Amino acid sequence: MSVDTATVRRIAGLARIAISDEEAARLAPELGNILDWIEQLSEVDTADVEPVTAVIANALRLRDDVVTDGGIRDRVLANAPQAEHGFFTVPKVIE
Amino acid sequence: MTDLTDLGIRGLRDGFHAGDFSAREVADAFNAAVAAAKPLNAFIVETPEHALAAADAADAARAAGEPAKPLAGVPIGMKDLFCTKGVQSTAASHILEGFTPEYESTVSQRLFDAGAGMLGKLNMDQFAMGSSNETSYFGNVVSPWRRKDGGNAALAPGGSSGGSSAAVAARIAPGATGTDTGGSIRQPAAFTGISGIKPTYGRCSRWGTIAFASSLDQAGPMARDVRDCAIMLEAMSGFDAKDATSLDLPVPQWEAGLNASLAGKRVGIPREYRVDNMPAEIDALWQQGVAWVKDAGAEVVEVSLPHTRYALPAYYIIAPAEASSNLARYDGVRYGLRDLPDGANLQQMYAQTRAEGFGDEVKRRILIGTYVLSAGFYDAYYTQAQKVRALIARDFDRAWEQCDVLLTPTAPSAAFALGEKSADPIAMYLNDVFTVPSSLAGLPAMSVPGGLDAAGLPLGLQIIGRALDEQGVLNAALAIEERAGFVARPARWW
């Protein structure tokens, strides 16, 4: 499958990764080759097969609906690139 | 006295317990070995003070007559995928450079609770994506092994747990944690002449382990021999309510259960693992492995795993898809890198941070994952891959009607030179051709050294077992280990 640079740009936009024109040109054939290679899966007959949800059978557990942690605001914020007044801060979103 | 760094986990544990040496002497010896091995670039961060603190605690407990913990006196290396409280944890990425967790991963906590100290955080392929340790932001790990051709080419230690494999092979750590998503414990173990086991999916908690592909990621030990792996795996395993896929089962006593007799066992040889262009030396080692398990009393049967050839392409849909989702969390807001050009808005900040923070292979996989999950393609790629995964798991289920474990090569070649395969992503992905199928099926699998190739480089054999049958895997690996008599080690050049 050929992948064009417009597709690379669209996917990179969805993935929130900035790419240059140069990178898009380099990535297009690279991704195309990988997609060509994984394309061979389409030849497997899976008409009667259910997709895997868990390879090792394991029932999802429920626990009591109680608070088990919290009160650690400063630890949550400790690694933030920018935090002020007990909040994560980001560039202004609403003008 | 013998050089303490020549001892493995059992030797250190038993020698400490017997009073032959103090834990502090052990920690000093390994700290010095780590400090002297900078050319390997195996560690991103060294933590000699952590190893010493654990050693002093062990010595004090021994002096007070308290019962010894299972790993008292044993310092280990910790793959940088495990979050360690107060110690930088980056997954060898720029985007997490400087990230210092406020919490401890379950696996590292269990090891510390068992008395182990930490020598440092081990280098790896960035976010565990790679098979050669060339995708780390902190530089390549160099294998301690060299070809005996006098060329001194720097060789890959395998990946993604390449710092772990290099450190254990170079005897600067008696054991190390690894993680395995598609072969990241077994392939580096094979490349460096050490042992490593990926247990059944769910045995080791994933809590606090930086996520790559959540349905595949599984921690395990890498050490010098099978017994050392059994000892370390016991300490790492166990139920954890903080991981929804953790198996709520008791941890078997794998070390006590070790038994190298394979009498009454059937060892399967999957015919589809005879791939094109397999080096004759790998095939010869495989045949040697067959002879060894027969000698240990096993019956050898040929089996078929018909969907084997589809495992790698399925993996390269499922793993990138899960990675693209898991790595969405790195946005420059809550932790790690933020790149905010003047005047940039929030969306531009996300895109710029991720462009700066992720390496090329990580970006490639995020883009592939985003593509296969995007509207209109989800069923054709992701759903189809998960159906093929079901067929691969069914192949193994049918094989278990005929045999107890499977014997295969671990990797299709010995270690290659750094730079030799990095230009072609698919050539690199093919390294995992023998390890990925068992990962997709969640099965326990182990690599054990079998011998050396003509260039003097280690080759590994892989044992794959039924779900939860780590004991059967360890025992078959032990039978091979006893017969292989692998004692080669890299000559020190660093």
Image (cartoon, rainbow, N blue to C red):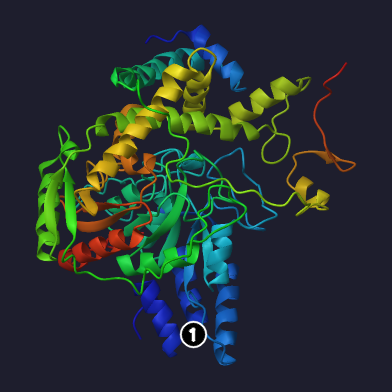
Q: Element at badge 1?
A: loop
- The residue under label 1 is B22
Instruction: Give the quarter of the figure containing the C terminus of chain B.
Output: bottom left
Relative to residue B354, is residue B68 drawn left or right? left
Q: Nearer the viewer, residue B449 or B319?
A: B319
* Residue at point 66%, 47% (across, down): B99
Residue B195, position in %: x, y?
A: 31, 59
Residue B280, position in %: x, y?
A: 10, 42
* Residue at point 51%, 32% (across, down): B322
Pick out the residue farthest to the front: A48
Subunit of mark 1?
B
Residue B232, position in %: x, y?
A: 43, 66
Q: Nearer the viewer, residue B257 or B48?
A: B257
Compared to residue A52, the image places residue B269 above or below, namely below
Q: Nearer the viewer, residue B111 or B261?
A: B261
Pick out the residue farthest to the right: A85
Relative to residue B155, is residue B129 drawn left or right? right
Residue B240, position in %: x, y?
A: 58, 57
Asked if residue B54 shows in the view, the reply is yes
Asked if residue B136 shows in the view, the reply is no
